[in-house]
Image (cartoon, rainbow, N blue to C red):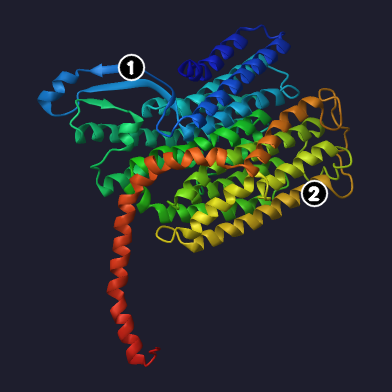
Amino acid sequence: MESIGLNLLIFLPLLGAILVWMMPEPRGDLVKRISLWVGLAVMVIALLLWVRVLQSGPAVLVGEFSQNWIAAGDAASGDLTGRPSAVRIKYHVGLDAISGVLVALTGLLIPLSVACSFPSIHKRQREYYAWLLMLTAGMFGVFAARDVLLFYIFFEFTLVPLYFLIGIWGGSERRTAANMFFLYTFVGSVITFAGILYLAVRAAVLTHSPTIEFDLLKLSVLSGLSATEQSLLFLAFFAGFAIKVPFFPVHTWLPLAHTEAPTAGSVLLAGVLLKLGTYGFLRFSLPMVPEGALAWSGVMGGLAVAGIIYGALVSWVQQDVKKLVAYSSVSHLGFCMLGMFSFVPVGLSGSVLYMVNHGINTGALFLVVGMIYDRYHTRDMEKIGGLARQMPIMAFFLVYFVLASIGLPGLNGFVSEFTVLFAAFNSTHVLGPWYGSLGAIGILLGAVYLLYMTGKVLFGPLREPDHTPDLAHVRTRDLNAREIGILLPLAVAALALGVYPRIVTDPLEPLLDAQVMRRIEGPLATRQVAMVSADSAVAPSTVTHSELSGDVRP
C-alpha cells in the first residue's frame, strides 16, 4: 500500500494536469476545484508517508518500488572484454528520513500554492494549473528517486513547468527571468550529468560489473576512486546543484526569477525547488565523493559565509518587498550549506532542518507579499506603508513569519540557525570558529533588513498608491477566510518545529551517520593525522626559539 501511495504522489498530479488541460477554457471554476482537490490529496498522502517514515527505522525504505525501466546492450559480452557492455536504468523509488521530510514539506505547500492563485490567475487558467500540477509531479519524483539517472530526469523535468509558469504568468520582465532561469540551471545540469555518467561507468569498472547501473545506494558506498577523480566529480556535481541552491556567486538568476514569477511560482521555488540543490549536495556529493567534498570544504565554507553576508546586505537596500525576500534566500541557504560542510553530525541534521524551516518561513513571506500585491498592485515600500491599521490580520502574519525567519526562540528558525552555527564553531578540523563568527553576523543583518521591511510596510503614516485597492477578487481590505486558511497551516508548522524540532532531527541523525558521516570519517581522519604531524614538526623549533629568547615560563 505504501508503494501505491508513493507512486500516486508522482502520477496523480500528472493525471490531474492532463484532466485540467482537457477542460474547456470557460470552466475556470471547475479547473480550480480539480487542481485544489488533487493538491489536497497529495498533501494527505505525503504526510501519511512521512508518518510511516517516522515509525520505521533508519534502514527501512518506505514505499519502495523497483522496476526495470531501460535496458540496453548485452551484459554477457562484458565477461569477454572486461569492460561494461550493458546499461540498466530502473524506476526505483522510496523514502527515507531525508527525502521523507522534504516530501512532506512539498505536500504541505502544493494545495496552498494552488489556493493562493485563485484571485490572480484569470487568463489561460487550465494551462496554468496543468503546469503547476506537472511541476508537483516532478518535485515529488526528485525526492523519491533511488536511481541516480531517474533523479536526474525528474531534476531536469522541473525546469519545464516552472519556465512556462514564469514566462507566461510572470511580471513585465517575465521572459528575461524565465530564460535566465532555464539557461543557468540547464547548463549546470549538463555538467552534472557528465559527472553522473562518469561515476556510473567507473563504478562498473571498479566492481568488475558487465552492466552500468545507477543505483543510488551502490554509488554512495563506492570505493576506489582517486582523490583527483573525486575532486573533479565534486566540481561536476557543484555545477548543477550550486546553481539550483542558489549558491553564491552563481545566484544571479534567482532575484529576477522570484520577482517576476507568480506568487505560487515564488512559493514553490523558495519552498521546494531551491532545496533540490541542497538535497543534491547532501545525497550525492558528500557520500559519493567524500574526499572531493573534504578537499573543497574550505572553499564551500567561504562561499557560504560570503553568500550569507552578501545576501543580507543586498536585501537591506531593496525597495521591492518581493525582491528583498528573494535575496534573503541567498543569505538563508548560505547557512544551510555552512552547516552541511562543517562535517559535524549536528550540522548535517541542522542543515536538513534549515531546508524545511526556510521552505515554511520564506514560502509564507512570499504568500503575504502576494496577498498585498493582489490589493495594491505594487510591492514598492515607498508607495505602501502603515498597513497595520488597514490590515491587522495581515500584519500579524507578516510579523509572525518575520520573527520566525530571524530566529526568535520558540519558532522554527531559531533551532536551525543555532545548530548550523554551533556546528561551524566546533568544526575546527574543517572550517573553524571564524566561519561561525561571520555567519553570526549574517543573523544580525537578517534581523536588520527584515525588521526594517516590517516597519516600512506596517507602521508609520498610512501610504497607499494613488489608485484605490483592487478588492474585486479578494473582497476585503484585510485577509479573507481563504487567505487565513492558506497561512494558518504554515504558522502552526513554524510553531511546532520551533517547540519540538526533534520530530525532524531524531530520524535524521542515524541515517546521516550511516550514509554521510561514515563516508567522511576516513578522509577526515587522514586530514587530522596530517595536521597533527605538521604541528609536531613545528613544535620543536617553537620551543627552541622561546628558550633562545629567554621567554621561558615555569
Q: What element carries label 2?
A: helix
Q: Is residue 5 visible?
A: yes
Q: Nearer the viewer, residue 189 or 413?
A: 413
Q: Left or right of 460: which side holds 305?
A: left
- Based on the displayed image, in which of its 4 quarters is residue 30 positioned? top right
The circle on residue 68 is 1
- Where's the C terminus, which quadrant? bottom left
Q: Which residue is drawn at 66% across and 26% down?
A: 113
Q: Which residue, as the protein is rendered here, is positioned at the far bottom?
A: 550
- Is residue 240 visible in the rendered image? The answer is no
What type is the residue that disc 1 sits on? Asn
Distance, label 1 to label 2, CA atoms, is 57 Å
Counting the numbered discs, the total is 2
Question: Could you tell me residue 124's position as x and y percent?
Answer: 67, 16
- Answer with the quarter of the image where residue 252 lies: top right
- Neighbours of disc 1 within 10 Å: few (<14), some (14-19), many (20+): few
Q: In this view, does 517 lie above or below 373?
A: below
Question: Could you tell me residue 412's position as x and y percent?
Answer: 64, 44
Q: What residue type is labelled 2?
A: Lys
Apparent side of residue 236 relative to residue 304 in the rendered image (left or right): left
Task: Say which residue label 2 marks.
Answer: 456
Rendering coords of residue 418 (x, y %): 58, 53
